[in-house]
Image (spheres, coloured by chain):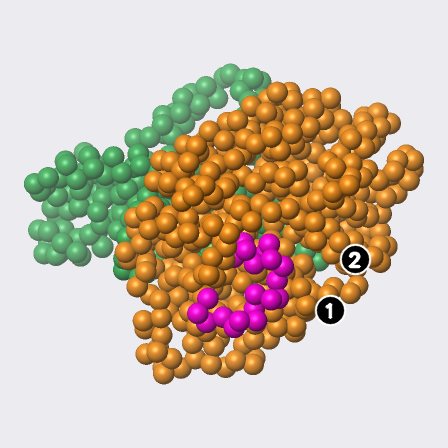
Amino acid sequence: MRLSTGTRIAALAAATALVASACSGGGDGDTGDGAEAAGPVELTFWTWAPNMEKVVDLWNADHPDVQVTVNKQDGGDPAVTKLLTAIKAGSGAPDIMQAEYQKIPQLVSADALADISGTLGDDVAGHFADGVWNAVTLGSDAVYAVPQDSGPMQFYYRADVFADLGIDVPTTWDEYAAAAATIHEKDPEMYLGTFSANDAGWFTGLTQQAGASWYGIDGDAWVVDVDSDATRKVAEYWGGLVEDGVIDNKPMYTPEWNAALNDGTQVGWLSAIWAPGVLAGNAADTAGSWEMAPMPQWDANAPATGTWGGSATGVTSQSEHPEQAAEFITWLNTDPAAVQALVDESGIYPADVPASTEALSDPPEFFSNQPDFYEVAAQTAGTVQPFTYGPNINVAFSAYNDEFAKATKAKKATAFVDAVEAMQRITLDDLKSSGFNVSE
Amino acid sequence: MTMLSSPSAGPVPGGSAAVPDGEGSVSRGRSGRRSAGERPSAVATGILLLGALYCLLPVVWVVVASTKSGSELFSTFTFAPSTHLLDNVADLDAYRDGLFWRWMANTALYAGVGALLSTLVSAMAGYGLAKYTFAGKNTVFNLLLAGVLVPAIVLAIPQYLLLAELELTNTYWSVLLPSIVSPYGIYLARIYAGASVPDEIVEAARTDGAGESRTFFQVAVPMMVPGLVTVFLFQFVAIWNNFMLPYIMLGDDRLFPITVGLSGLLNQGASQPALYTLVITGALLSIIPLVALFLTLQRFWRVDLAAGAVKS
């Protein structure tokens, strides 16, 4: 429930930190009525979900008055940077924007997202899990986006290799470390996983599972809590595995990593619910040999997991048609036909609870060997731990990339803990120098 | 984007030969003398071969990799070709109803029109700076030199903010307009006009009654052609390979040039696999027009100083 006071802070942040808001605030619906008479309302939609235009075609066919155009963007950070530049410049932003959950506080504090609470139906909130809904309201009465997909984390592993080596699926982190050691001992080329200094979202999810929350609220001030006991525990654990050499230290999503997935030298991946799509794209020939299990646990009696990825769809503050845009994103993320299309065409794990049970009956094709795939997934999704993102999460993430790149190269557990300390310092300094009210 | 820029590495030394006083002509003279008796040095040949390998290997890699299917790409030997080139091209063609071809056409438009206009502006400005005397001429030229030193990438964000004021971002103009002015092109044109268009000819044209614009277009420009081809090719390649400017300016993916479009296929976010085979095949297809352009325009460089009409 740390989120619950988030918005007061976010609103405060918007008021204090934003210098360039004067030119961007004017667009909210002032000109909407005039333009409607001239013909169909044209909305642009920045997204990186594949085949989103096919989902949008369904809407366009039924709504001749509100036509949506998809502009596919680079995934994640680049799209946000581009949006913030457009907001600062005062023009050039789309009407509708896909944004990862961790970016929402940053976008709200830059006044990039419009509050659509006035135009949303009362029943929309009921479609989503509380934690997910909190991420788009920041705990306030305002609504800055409608959740699109979520990414609860699980453990993916090569079931055939595990069977060959006679290893049980690890259920705790101790067992995970033991399994990693056994695998690497049997074949020095083979690793159970890798510690990736390129994927801050992945590490965030691991610390979230351990109970960390990198930001917090204290009265009317932000707290930066990257350097917490939970984060240190996770960093030390992985630093130890890398130091022992039983876990690889190369980043994910590189051609090298892809090759390792293909030739079976990476036999496990701590990933999220969207992993089947990535595995199918990068290592198609290994289909049928992977299985999914809940994450290894710190405390086997209190199962927990984090999230990696997941995003919402919001209306930008530059949109001249916020009402129609809000209507569209509600349809996109809660209408059963739209959610079904999101699953079929874009391959996402929808955030909408009622529609997703229907849409996710069969396992993904790549995991057809595991009929209970989505049952296990739903079970893990229920154990996602609360986590608060702050307005300069981009700084924390880039500090992660820089500091952990050094630590993974050094291959020392102490260097991993140092990296966490450096992240804390960099994030805190930036938040203060950006003019936010920060409590230490 | 190194794959895209590697073919341009070849012709650049040729480009300097087009500058009349450049090193090209000097080294040619030296090597001419040496070839009379000495054999070429084995060391020099070795170093040049290494350089050639360095430039050509990435191209070979792109050609080989584009023949592989998605699963072969990361599992077979790097330089072992496969048979899936046509499948990959078909996949690329099918991607979002042939959006790739639209990106190709956009790049051709940005690079073609941008380089033509840029060459025209450079020729006029360079000729003006070389052949006229006016107050502040040296200041203008010095500012220009300073402009050559500022990388275009630094200007992308200020240009975005300026064009946003005019509401021109996310249009073809937002990429074309900043591409038209090239300090380096003007600098090159000024040097070339100064060296290849003798004052006497300009005087003679004036004496014969030609106006200033006629003197420029019908007398000076033909003499400057080799230099202008260099400026054109230089700008063409620079715009063709440009990433930052269109990346910042454009939100509509139907306006994207190849570079930004292909980068989008690679950066699909953590939850999607990167479309490596499409990107590699796209990179291969995108260098074909560049190679063709260089092969056809190369002969203009050889014209060199034959344009001189008076002895001086």
Where residue A63 sits in the image (x, y, percent)?
Answer: 52, 80
Mark 2: give few (<14), some (14-19) or many (20+) Cα within 10 Å: some
Read off the chain for label 1. Answer: A
Q: Which colour is chain A painted?
A: orange
Mark 1: give few (<14), some (14-19) or many (20+) Cα within 10 Å: few
* In magenta stretch: residue A259: no
Q: Which colour is chain B painted?
A: green
Q: Is residue B136 left or right of residue A234?
A: left
Q: Residue at x 43, y 24 (%)?
A: B32
Q: Residue at x 22, y 55 (%)?
A: B218
Q: Report the residue marked by disc 1.
A: A358
Where residue A57 sits in the image (x, y, percent)?
Answer: 58, 73
Q: Secondary structure at mark 1?
A: helix
Query: What type is the residue that disc 2 sits on?
Result: Glu
Q: Which residues are magenta?
A: A117-136
Where residue B167 sits, quadrant-wise, is bottom left
Q: Residue at x 54, y 76 (%)?
A: A60
Q: CA distance from mark 2 to mark 1?
A: 12 Å
Q: Nearer the viewer, residue A89 or B183?
A: A89
Q: Nearer the viewer, residue B156 or A303?
A: A303
Question: How many numbered circles are shown?
Answer: 2
Q: Residue at x 63, y 55 (%)?
A: A150
Q: Report the residue marked by disc 2.
A: A375
Q: Residue furthest front?
A: A219
Q: Nearer the viewer, residue A71 or B106?
A: A71
- Residue A363 vs A327, above or below: the answer is above
- Residue B10 vs A319, above or below: the answer is above
Q: Secondary structure at mark 2?
A: helix
